[in-house]
Image (cartoon, helix red, strand yellow):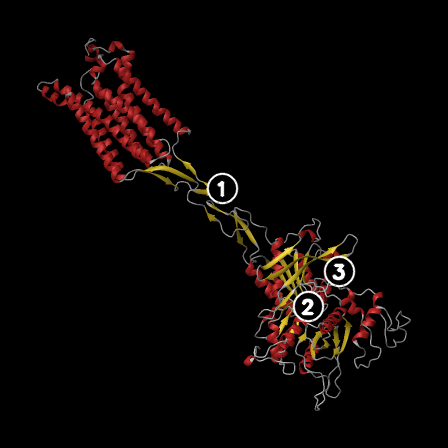
Amino acid sequence: MRKSGDVILGGLFEVHYSSIFPELSFTSEPHQPKCQGFDIQGFRHANTMIFAIEEINRNSNLLPNVTLGYTLYDNCGTLGIAFRASLSLVSGQEEQFILDGTCAGSPPVPGIVGDSYSTFTIAVSSVIGLYRLPLVSYFATCPCLSDRQRFPSFFRTIPSDTFQVRAMIQIMKRFGWTWAGLLVSDDDYGLHAARTLQSDLALSGVGCLSYSEVLPWGNDPAELRRIVNLIKISAARVVIVFAHETHMIHLMEEVVRQNVIGLQWMASEAWASVSVLQTPDLMPYLAGTLGIAIRRGEIPGLRESLLRILPEKNYNSSYGNSLLNQFWEYTFQCRFTPPPAGWVEAGGALCSGEENLEDVESELFDVSDLRPEYNVYKAVYALAYALDDMLQCEPGRGPFSGHSCRNLKELEPWQLVQYLQEVNFTTSFGDQVSFDANGDALPIYDIMSWQWLPDGKTEVLNVGEFKRSASKGEELTIDEDKIFWNFDSKKPPRSVCSESCPPGTRMARKKGEPVCCFDCIPCSEGKISNETDSMECISCPEDFWSSPQRDHCVPKKTEFLSYHEPLGICLTTTSLLGTCICALVLGVFICYRSTPMVRANNSELSFLLLASLKLCFLCSLLFIGRPRLWTCQLRHAAFGISFVLCVSCILVKTMVVLAVFKASKPGGAASLKWFGAMQQRGTVIVLTSIQAAICTVWIVSASPAPYKNTQYHNDKIVYECVVGSTVGFAVLLGYIGSLAILSFLLAFLARNLPDNFNEAKLITFSMLIFCAVWVAFVPAYVNSPGKYADAVEVFAILASSFGLLLALFGPKCFIILLRPEKNTKKAIMGRGTTKS
């Protein structure tokens, strides 16, 4: 299809979708291939370019005084024909050229609109790129075409598949689909899309592919059966298809044959809105398909222009028929040439050329969903604006050497490339058109949903868009309420390899499988995950522990010998009971202080001993309750000093007993002068002061302090008092033990001294109890963890205190209260009974 003009624009379109090449031989004359299968969509694409050129010619503001012409070629869906057509456009020569002074023939084109297939475009652009002639494609989406090194003069008004792939990934992310299958055509379009999708999915971490298969060209039943079987057994409910409608037709035949339902199809722009797949037989399977469609646009006046198409009544073509006449025959199902015998009887008719296009229903005239046509329209205008910018160049301000400009006679193709790179205009539909450094237009796609209406009709509805802008970056907008879901739930399907790991677990990859296939492993103790699909569990802070669900940290339980727990209550009660008993005994001794029993047992030391025992009982309370610095420091000091005071009193009482019996012997009276009241008090004070000095040095040098121990239990904090200095604690206990042993030995020596009531026997027995308790305390204390160490020490204090109290004062109180007849001087001295 041709029209002359000042500037001729070239075009490559698929008006037929197959061709038959004649056999080649060296003897026969070469013949042209025969194109078959009229493609009404391709015919409309070509006429859209014609309409755009005629509209530009009518526009006085764009290319004034310049008439655009066109030369359009049919590629017949065959690479060889597309390649030969492009070379004809570049050379400006037809089947023959005339060498004369005027160089007659079609002039070379400054730019070409086309081609539709990525594979064809790659081959064509690789050659015409050598001449830097601009090629503006309206349908080729292969990402490889963005390589400016390989394709320096390539531009396109359709987004690259790189952007389409990102749209697919964003939709998957929106609906939570992490497990999908991929089917692609066996060409540059499909294979490049597959590589891009696989790499982008891996980088984004949005999902994984269960399978990736290449659809065969043509109808290959065995291969298609294998692919559909794979789709059927896969857990992936989402199937992404980057292929052409011919591939989908063959694939869906096998899908219907095997009745594979319950799939969510995602369509690339190549078949997202084709009507041939929207049939009653296929809609049970394809209804609800989400498609990435080319941006829809509006071209005012296009329908009226198409309705003005008329057949060529007088033509002479070696190809057998003109495109216009083929369109007429296709539309009205008639023939211009005499039909074969019997054809009319079979229902055929002859074309008159007077048929009315408005009387037929043809998708050619449906301009409500212009998508590839809109890209053709923008491609023509991009070339026109580039030419207009070149013609408006002011001398001295041009982009070429010496700031020169170019006119139509001097125009070189590479010069138009520079102007095309800087094109920036807005269509009547409101879309901005410009090209980036790689020749790609501003990307924008429509999101389509295949609706299956209750009356059985189908509709492809625009439910959103995916675009990129300089200010906001990539944006996905979807109105989910408009989407038709072909499932009983009427909701998006669930398509995952493994279900999400809830909080409290982490993902563990399955060996040899994609990252989307994993097991959910519960977090170990002390670690949590508070998000879904956590890769790792995080450790809780030191004072916190994981909850039973492992989804948040909770404060660790605290453990110490408390006043509120049964053990603490028992020990506290026992301590207060001992204190009360000491007070009662002291009261008894005060009331009966004038009796022989009290006076004979050194009443002053007895009172002091009872007071020290009361302190021993009370100091045990410092071991109960939450440890604090002052309680840690005071507990051992009070314990050590109280017991030294107690044992010192017992030691002095023992020494006094020995001195008294020694004084009863001849010449022994002088020994009593060392054991007067002052000496007794002084001895007790000195011995107690030594312990006080030990405690002071210990607290000053290495003070006991509270400590949060997490070694016993991971989920508990055991509050305890560390002794600070083990040597100090050992010296304190050793000093008490040495005094106790000394008292025991002296009392043991005096146990058989003659008297009716010899206190040395009671002291011996009490010291034996005391030493036994504290000898057993050491290993029990060392092996008891946490609060039980404090309980052991309190128990030792109480046991030894009760032992001393009962052994020393029990018999005396018994006589004072229950045997008053023995509380006489004669009875104590042994004179109240007759000796045999």
Q: Amino acid at mark 3?
A: Gln
For this rendering, which residue is in front, 365 or 3?
3
The answer to whether 602 appears left or right of 304 in the picture is left
Residue annotated with mark 1: 547
From the image, state whether disc 1 or disc 3 is nearer to you: 3
Which x, y percent locates residue 284? 74, 56
Badge 1 or badge 3: first in the primary sequence: 3
Residue annotated with mark 3: 278
The answer to whether 549 appears left or right of 768 in the picture is right
For this rendering, which residue is in front, 495 or 274?
274
The answer to whether 363 appears left or right of 800 in the picture is right
From the image, state whether disc 1 or disc 2 is nearer to you: 2
Residue annotated with mark 2: 375
For this rendering, which residue is in front, 528 or 232?
528
Q: Amino acid at mark 1?
A: Ser
Q: Residue 428 appears in which quarter of the rendering?
A: bottom right
Judge the density around disc 1: few (<14), some (14-19), many (≥20) Cα neighbours within 10 Å.
Answer: some
Q: Is residue 423 above or below residue 678?
A: below
